[in-house]
Amino acid sequence: MGSNFKFEIIGGSPFGPNSMIRHDLTRYGTGPTLAEGSGSSFTYVFGGSYVPELWYARFYADKNNNQQYDPGEPMLTSDTFEVKLKKVYNISVALSQNILGWAAITPDNVKEVLNRAAAIVLRKDSADDYRAAVQFNLSGLFSFPATPSGGLQPDPASTEADRMKLFGYADVVILNSLPNLNGITLDYDWHKILLAYREFATNPNGAQNLATFLVHEMGHGVGLPHRGASPTLMAEGVWFGDNVINLNESNSYDS
Ligand SMILES: [Zn+2]
């Protein structure tokens, strides 16, 4: 959606200083050509009704200046790539009033956590770390007075019976205490996520830590199991900042 891509030859022209460099952007296999022109860089905006297909950019030295590629003219092509539309998750959040500092938590605080969670999914730290085009929107936020374990809205949610009362109360329910857990997702359903974070409003790293827990649980919510060890998004346990995702994980967020 309005994705603006820039293509350029990095490090200068390999074709020589007097080459007439032209470029085009074409569907892999057979046309159409989306863009063409002269110069060693160009930009293109993929539109909102775009259908995913493979594309590649090409630069060539138009030695006979006929404004089209002819066999034998020096050429550089990019890898093929696919442009994905952004997947938007509208997330409602419920906060237990047992969370230390819950009264200081504002919609902006929660939006910051969601933005940080999206940024984790969007990271690309290595060649085998794949991006997902994901946005997490805050669609609703409310707090609720918690009851002791065994009550209707239990925090701590000490037992499975406690947790079952809270799943689906909002897409994401944040509690002060889930004994022995940072978060849990029911039935691979991102509408049924519980998170524990008692330092949400008071720890300088609270927003980032909570985002890490959230995006891991969202991974379960879009169908991902645990895999491997740190540094991966879906490693079991607590990892701060180590969130490499693979292609399969990226595709799960996009689908
Ligand atoms: Zn997990």
Image (cartoon, grey):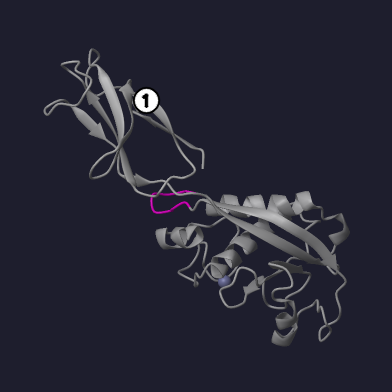
Location of residue 93 in the rendering, given as x and y in whole percent from the top left corner: 74, 63
Residue beneath the point at 77% across and 56% down: 203
Q: Residue furthest left?
A: 72
From the image, give the main secondary structure of the stretch colored magenta: loop
| Residue that mark 1 sits on | 41
Numbered range of the magenta stretch: 123-131
Location of residue 51 in the rendering, given as x and y in whole percent from the top left corner: 40, 48
Location of residue 66 in the rendering, given as x and y in whole percent from the top left corner: 19, 18
Pick the residue in front: 204 or 23. 23
Q: Residue furthest top?
A: 18
SS of the residue under disc 1: strand
Q: Is residue 75 left or right of residue 27?
A: left
Q: Is residue 74 visible?
A: yes
Q: Which quadrant holds residue 37?
A: top left
Q: Is residue 247 left or right of residue 117?
A: left
Q: Is residue 189 left or right of residue 203?
A: left
Name the kind of residue labelled 1 in the image. Answer: Ser
The answer to if 92 sits in the magenta stretch is: no
Q: 10 Å neighbourhood of mark 1: few (<14), some, or many (≥20)? A: some
Q: Is residue 101 visible?
A: no
Q: Which quadrant holds residue 71?
A: top left
Residue 201 sits above or below residue 78 on the image? below
Residue beneath the point at 57% across and 53% down: 120
Q: Which quadrant holds residue 240?
A: bottom right
Q: Tell which quarter ligand 1 is in.
A: bottom right
Residue 62 sits above or below residue 237 on the image? above
Location of residue 25 in the rendering, given as x and y in whole percent from the top left corner: 32, 34
